[in-house]
Amino acid sequence: MRAPVPTQVQPSSPLQAGARCGDCPIRYRAVCAQCEGDELALLERMKFYRSFEAGQPIVWEGDRMDFVASVVSGVATLTRTLEDGRAQMVGLLLPSDFLGRPGRDTAAYNATAATGVVLCCIRRGPFDQLMQRIPHLAHRLLEMTLDELDAAREWMLLLGRKTAREKIASFIAIIARRQAALQKRRPAGRIVLELPLTREAMAAYLGLTIETVSRQMTALRRDGIIEIVGKRGVTLTDYARLIAESGGTGDDGATA
Amino acid sequence: MRAPVPTQVQPSSPLQAGARCGDCPIRYRAVCAQCEGDELALLERMKFYRSFEAGQPIVWEGDRMDFVASVVSGVATLTRTLEDGRAQMVGLLLPSDFLGRPGRDTAAYNATAATGVVLCCIRRGPFDQLMQRIPHLAHRLLEMTLDELDAAREWMLLLGRKTAREKIASFIAIIARRQAALQKRRPAGRIVLELPLTREAMAAYLGLTIETVSRQMTALRRDGIIEIVGKRGVTLTDYARLIAESGGTGDDGATA
DNA sequence: CGGTACATTGACAGTTGTCAACTTAAGTGG
DNA sequence: CCACTTAAGTTGACAACTGTCAATGTACCG
């Protein structure tokens, strides 16, 4: 969760600095999805990119946050912490997901780059104004927020009622579905995956300890449900079997 | 969770059928809060009330839902269920909270009246159109949805990381805060409460069993943190002491 | 080819769930 | 108004699951 290497890269990106919105990989899924023409041009002038290495903090709970952002690539996590240090992940941000809250100037969560992450940022003040002027923006953000709320509720079901084994199976299924969606396929049969989270982050996601995550991964492997490749690699022998282990209600509920 | 008595009251209300929006108790907190004049008049013509007795289902997961609604009075719950019947509450709707999702025609959750409930309803089709025409509506709904998302994330922290004792203390604190807020006070010192949920519903809220809820309530009483009155009554001897038992991060995170 | 962070495994303890019996609060009808 | 009925809540004994603490193993970096 902490910067793994002292390589303190400053989070301003040289890469794709001048990339056109039209070429953006998240063009039709992000908060700007419904914007066209003038609206998009406005956004295009205001946007700037920031990059983060795996493990780097993006913002810390309580910090001033003077921008909002869309995840362009990579995976970021939102985490909430109890006074004594117990931490629970409360958001998993994938490409096109939105970070920050319009009208709020301090971060409510710890945001961390789980993998290398590129954000498309806009200063909060100007963005708040755009929200007033461009109904498409507000409308799309509402839609995305409602989706996130659905996902959070699915996640609550997992946290409150699933066993450790079901939690692990559910998590792997979520990653499998997401990966299939990127390739515009339905998940089925044998699937090769790369988990975007460490065991520690998985534990934070699932409300478990690292050790329990590890043991249940081993148990699923022993039972022939999955194969484990390196630290991050997982191969499903049969997607349907994994789903059967996940405790049901596995419709989709994954996004955020 | 099921209708406690066979008194099958049909959920159409005789009460306040013609109540004016101007007199509405949730006028300045509900989705219509920012509407005035013409906008409010539009809503006023379209609204209708429905009442439910404690224990009655409002809508069932997968059912067609042809209206959206605001809770005018009482408490409703949203619940998600696993195939084998394990149930987790995922939403607690208090007066002014919104029920239903614009643009979605089937319910995603089981909604149940925890107490007697009055809903102010609008048919979904017309409401969706109003969302386009009245920016205030969409703006307020976004704001409310973002608040609900925050609350859901606080709830996830509770579900994933708090002990049974902390969960109970947190829940009582949430109810105490809400009640204090209604009376425009800060919660402090000795407080007399009525819990709006049965032990079963509390268990569903907290990701526990009834028995564990009961045991922890007893433990808090034995330790002098609370007094238990009838089935629903609780008296806090000292709000600060309760908070100390709740595991921290008790800022607010309660609403939905 | 090490070094190091990450991951796995084991032994044990503690918390919560399960099953069952019992108690109490509240509502109903005599 | 009280006894009765019934659902809701409590308590106990025990089992199971997950967490804790500690040691060991192993991918992946330079």
Image (cartoon, coloured by chain):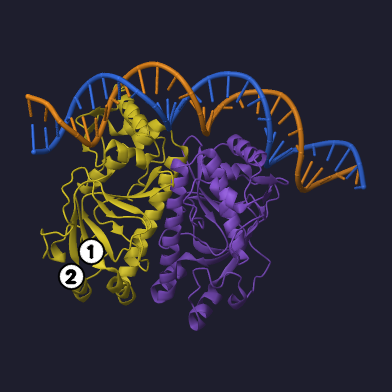
Chain colours: A yellow, B purple, C orange, D blue
Q: Determine whether the residue tagged by mark 2 lies in a helix, strand or loop.
A: helix
In the rendered image, residue B254, in percent from the top left (x then y), is placed at: 51, 55
Q: Cβ–Cβ below 8 Å for labels 1 and 2? A: no
Where in the figure is residue B162, as x and y percent of width and height?
48, 42
Q: How many callouts does the rendering have?
A: 2
Chain for numbered disc 2: A
Callout 2 amino acid: Glu
Q: In the rendered image, which residue does mark 2 sit on?
A: A44
Instruction: List the residue tagged with mark 1.
Output: A121
**Which disc number belongs to residue A181?**
none
Separation of disc 1 and disc 2 at Cα? 10 Å
Q: In the figure, is residue B136 to the left or right of B21?
A: left
Where is residue A55 drawn, in percent x and y? 23, 46
Residue occupying image coordinates x 47% and y 43%: B159
In the image, residue B184 sits, relative to residue A93, either above or below, namely below
Write down the quadrant of residue A188 in the picture: top left
Q: Is residue A30 visible?
A: no
Specify few, some or many for label 1: CA neighbours under 10 Å numbering under 14, 14-19, or 20 or more: many
List x then y, in percent, for residue A22: 15, 65
Q: Nearer the viewer, residue B169 or B85?
A: B169
What residue is drawn where x is 64% and y is 47%?
A: B3
Give the quadrant of residue A178.
Answer: top left
Is residue D23 toward the left or the right of residue B201 in the image?
Answer: left
**Sequence-wise, which precedes: disc 1 or disc 2?**
2
Residue D18 sits above or below residue A92 on the image: above
